[in-house]
Image (cartoon, rainbow, N blue to C red):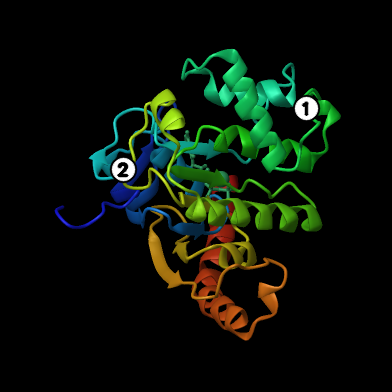
Amino acid sequence: MAGSVAPALELQDIRCTFRAREGGESYTAVDRSTLRVEAGEFVSVVGPTGCGKSTLLNVAAGLLVPSAGTVRVFGQPLQGINARAGYMFQAEALLPWRTAEQNVMLGLQYRGLPEAEQRAQAQRWLARVGLAGFGDRYPHQLSGGMRKRTALAQTLVRDPDIILMDEPFSALDVQTRQLMENEVLELWAGDGRRPAPTPERASSEGRHAGAGGAGRKAVLFITHDLDEAIAMSDRVVVLSAGPATRPIGEFVIDLPRPRDVAEVRNQPRFVELHAQVWAVLRDEVIKGYAQQLQRGVA
Ligand SMILES: Nc1ncnc2c1ncn2[C@@H]1O[C@H](COP(=O)(O)OP(=O)(O)OP(=O)(O)O)[C@@H](O)[C@H]1O
Ligand SMILES: [Mg+2]
């Protein structure tokens, strides 16, 4: 690998077969799937409902061991949980009995930092996601958007080199969602301008500046919203309908940055890209829907 930087994430020929309970047929959700995210790259994966998007993300996170294929993280084979990645789930992941600040601190606890340092970092991140002054609220005292912001802070406080997001904003109303999308883009782009870690931070966290160690994070973003995917990404990957889902199309999104996710949709190039991707995605969405109905009655 001399002279080249390994991709942040490399899924090679992945197959995921789920065993059925008592005598039923097993189901191969994903097959021959190869997917790469370069260091600092923002990649979205779109595909019909039930096709295997979360399955692939779980493989990337190390939460699910594939039936076949390999996963590499910055060139190293993945074993166990992907420690270089932060994961933001579709579902609410905050602990209801902990305040926003305590929830964000959870992201740091395993590092063994002193509690005061954990608290300081949590406060810094709550402020960065627009929640300064809300740290003592419990999740039920926050709006849906604020809870998502807290979850974002919880993910980013660990300073992961890779961010895995599984439809993180799909439960939000359109306006809040666009605000959050823009904020994620700003935070992500801001990291590209961030100076290298201070010596104090580098030593306290035992980090070394390797590929992706400083600068923009690699993002793997799962969504079934094509507009969201195009507005945010450097590259959009389209998955086929299941079973045996695999990538069937890949589109480089050459829209200039910085982008405003609401405004970028009006650009002619956006409309053109949307038509190109949709031409591939449309048939899969129809197939995926038909298959779900069939499996439902089988
Ligand atoms: N643990 C499991 N056991 C059996 N089948 C599973 C399991 N996990 C996922 N599946 C099946 O694999 C397929 C892919 O599921 P997955 O959750 O990855 O889809 P998805 O693309 O994320 O869907 P959605 O868009 O609805 O979130 C589905 O048909 C699902 O029923
Ligand atoms: Mg899913």
* Mark closer to the chain start, 1 or 2: 1
Residue 258 location (% of width, % of height): 60, 67
Determine whether the residue tagged by mark 1 lies in a helix, strand or loop: helix
Q: Residue at x 52, y 79 (%)?
A: 276
Figure check: 206 above or below 284:
above
Q: In this view, does 73 lie to the left or right of 236?
A: left
Ligand 2 quarter of the rendering: top right
Mark 1 and mark 2: Cα distance apart in space: 36 Å
**Which amino acid is tagged 2?**
Gly
**Which amino acid is tagged 1?**
Pro
In which quarter of the view is residue 252 placed?
Answer: bottom left
Figure check: 42 above or below 143:
below
Q: Which residue lies furthest to the left in this view?
A: 2
Q: Are marks 1 and 2 in contact (CB under 8 Å)?
A: no
**10 Å neighbourhood of mark 1: few (<14), some, or many (≥20)?**
many
Residue 104 location (% of width, % of height): 64, 27
Residue 97 location (% of width, % of height): 74, 16
Q: Which residue lies furthest to the right in this view?
A: 141
State whether residue 236 appears in this view.
yes
Residue 19 versus residue 24: which sits nearer the camera?
19
State whether residue 91 appears in this view.
no
Q: In this view, does 173 lie to the left or right of 4?
A: right
Residue on which the image places disc 1 = 139
**10 Å neighbourhood of mark 2: few (<14), some, or many (≥20)?**
few
Q: Residue at x 63, y 67 (%)?
A: 227
Q: Is residue 257 left or right of residue 59?
A: right
Q: Which residue is drawn at 83% across and 38% down?
A: 143
Residue 188 location (% of width, % of height): 55, 52
Residue on which the image places disc 2 = 210
In which quarter of the view is residue 103 placed?
Answer: top right
Determine whether the residue tagged by mark 2 lies in a helix, strand or loop: loop
